[in-house]
Image: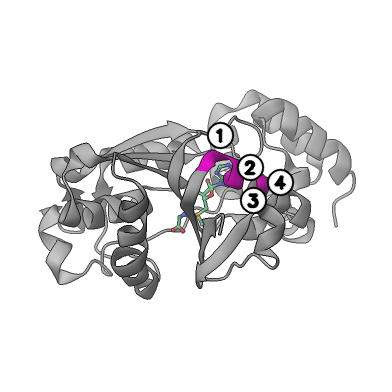
Amino acid sequence: MLQNYEAFKTKVLALTSIDLNAYKERQMKRRIDALITKNNLKTYDEYIDLLRKDKVALKDFVNYLTINVSEFFRNPEQWKVFENIILPHLREHNSGRLKIWSAACSTGDEPYTIAMILLKHMPATSFELTATDIDDQVLAKAQSGLYTAKSIKGVPAEFKANFEKIGTDSFQISDNIKRCVRFKQHNLLKDPYPTGLDMIVCRNVLIYFTDEAKDEIFHKYNRCLNNNGVLFIGNTEQILSPKNFGFTAIKSFFYTKGV
Ligand SMILES: C[S@@+](CC[C@H](N)C(=O)[O-])C[C@H]1O[C@@H](n2cnc3c(N)ncnc32)[C@H](O)[C@@H]1O
């Protein structure tokens, strides 16, 4: 086991703005130690020296830390709930433009999933969809809109026409879906949050954070949602006492602000 993780965390914060204190320690440390060994290094100090000197190693480190597995229509049953129950709820409470934030969006599969469902029911002018992630490599991939057969295998038949096959294992998402999403780099642990939102989709990232970090994020999410706005979280996540954060559960994994 490597020594001096505390000092390493401080140096990583200075170098990357990533506060490792907010991530569950055992899991994170295990991942970082494995990465150090893979780089044929033996100490945190050696690794920090490498990260300071080598931009590619630094990018790889951030990319590796941030675990960015995603797929279109991940947990399809939840997207049915979104389309059939949550979307009508949002439209009932907002007659103007829906403002939606996909936080920790990874390679774009999630916000593009949202865009496809929304476009089925309303014109692109009636919603504003922002997608953010801490990792600029996944954001670049999201903006390219290129996907493998594996990541789009869960796309329902009715939406398949949004992808054009352009190589043996490469599919390009259509421009009309791409146009609906604005991607931006954003660190959930540090940057200011957008306000006046109707919905926040934040799935499969909070599991990596400590309870304290999660609680602070739930409070912030509540503050940036409009009344009756909805928070949609991942299938392995739940808010134990939603009332403490001003939320009410409306369906599994969906919480609304207020009554
Ligand atoms: C497992 S992916 C989830 C992607 C998508 N939401 C989904 O459920 O399929 C987790 C994402 O969280 C991002 N992430 C990790 N820490 C973050 C932070 N502090 N701020 C913003 N995004 C973060 C990672 O870069 C990664 O892309």
Q: Which picture quadrant has residue 14?
A: top right
Q: Is residue 46 magenta?
A: no
Tag 1 and tag 2, C-beta contact below 8 Å: yes
Q: Secondary structure at mark 1?
A: loop
Mark carried by residue 218: 3
Across and down, in percent, residue 151 comes to 31, 62
Q: Are marks 2 and 3 in contact (CB under 8 Å)?
A: yes
Q: Which residue is mark 1?
A: 193
Q: Which mark is residue 216?
A: 4
Q: Amino acid at mark 2?
A: Lys
First of labels 3, 1 by sequence position: 1
- Give the percent coordinates (x, y) of residue 204: 53, 60
Between marks 1 and 4, how big is the CA–CA gap?
Answer: 12 Å
Q: Which mark is residue 220?
A: 2
Q: Residue at x 26, y 68 (%)?
A: 153
- Label 1 to label 2: alpha-carbon separation: 8 Å
Three-letter code, disc 1: Tyr
